[in-house]
Image: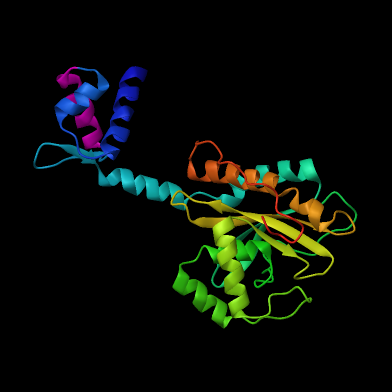
Amino acid sequence: MSQTVDRALSILPLLAQGPADLGQVAERLGVHKSTALRLLRTLHEHGLVYRQEDQRYRLGARLFALAQEAVENLDVREIAHPHLVALNERIGHTVHLAVYEDGEVLYIDKVESRYPVRMYSRVGKPVAITVAAVAKLLLADLPDAERRAVADKLDYPMYTPRSTPNAPAFLKELAAVREQGWATDLGGHEESINCVGAPVRGTDGRVVAAMSVSAPNVVVTAEELLGLLPLVRRTADAITREYSGNIADTPDIPDTPDKEGRS
């Protein structure tokens, strides 16, 4: 039975490359045409493959519906949480996970620092959208027109001298974040707090969430926190692989940026 299941499942990636006829399927599986036909009929009955008028087979609509349903039911917070905890246990600093919903960037998970000085952030609370690293990551991934429309509507409070002052400056920073694949907040919201972040992506490669590590400069300097960026990015990549079902190796992580946030 297990061999039959294995053969049937092997048909799906074959048809993902394009329609194939019975002979091609049988040849690829290394089985007689009668065996291939039996497997195809079973998959056809369940809507996983479809026989075209030219007698070639392609992937069925039911397969796409199942895939979409599975993606919609994925809980990025549930998947990410063990990774966030592991990172926190390794480095000790506060770890956040955030998403973009209805024009706001919200924290959906937080693992507290083990140090006495704690962050005032709360799960469910919107972040300072023009300065937070997680917000930059989420907004940077928006389509160009939407990104510009969002930037034009925002207010730009000067929390500190390092805060983003206006829409053109914000769009310039988002462009850099989009290109480099990571973001920082080095005293932009609170002068004493620094943060580095990386994106979590879905099956389509779009950013579905953003994670970050934050720490006060009395615990760790900005330069030391930036030194953790490769570890933060590897954690985000691990969450991405689990969330998207992609088991490919993690891409090489570039060198650590300097203390100003440049790579």
* Residue 240 appears in view: yes
- The residue at 33%/49% (across/down) is 65
Quadrant hosting residue 251: top right
Task: Tell which of 64 and 142 is nearer to you.
Answer: 142
Is 126 contained in the magenta span? Answer: no
On-image quarter of the C terminus: bottom right
- The residue at 76%/46% (across/down) is 88
The figure's colour scheme reads rainbow
Position of residue 127 relative to residue 203, above or below, is below
Task: Tell which of 83 and 77 is nearer to you.
Answer: 83
Quadrant hosting residue 186: bottom right
Q: What secondary structure characterizes most of the magenta part?
A: helix
The stretch in magenta equals: 32-46
- The residue at 88%/54% (across/down) is 219
* Residue 112 appears in view: no
On-image quarter of the N terminus: top left
Position of residue 140 relative to residue 233, above or below, is below
- Across and down, in percent, residue 96 comes to 70, 56
- Across and down, in percent, residue 73 comes to 48, 50
- Across and down, in percent, residue 35 comes to 20, 20
Is 38 contained in the magenta span? Answer: yes
- The residue at 73%/74% (across/down) is 163
- Which residue is farthest left? 54
- Across and down, in percent, residue 7 comes to 30, 23
Left or right? Give the position of 146 relative to 76: left
Position of residue 11 relative to residue 123, above or below, is above
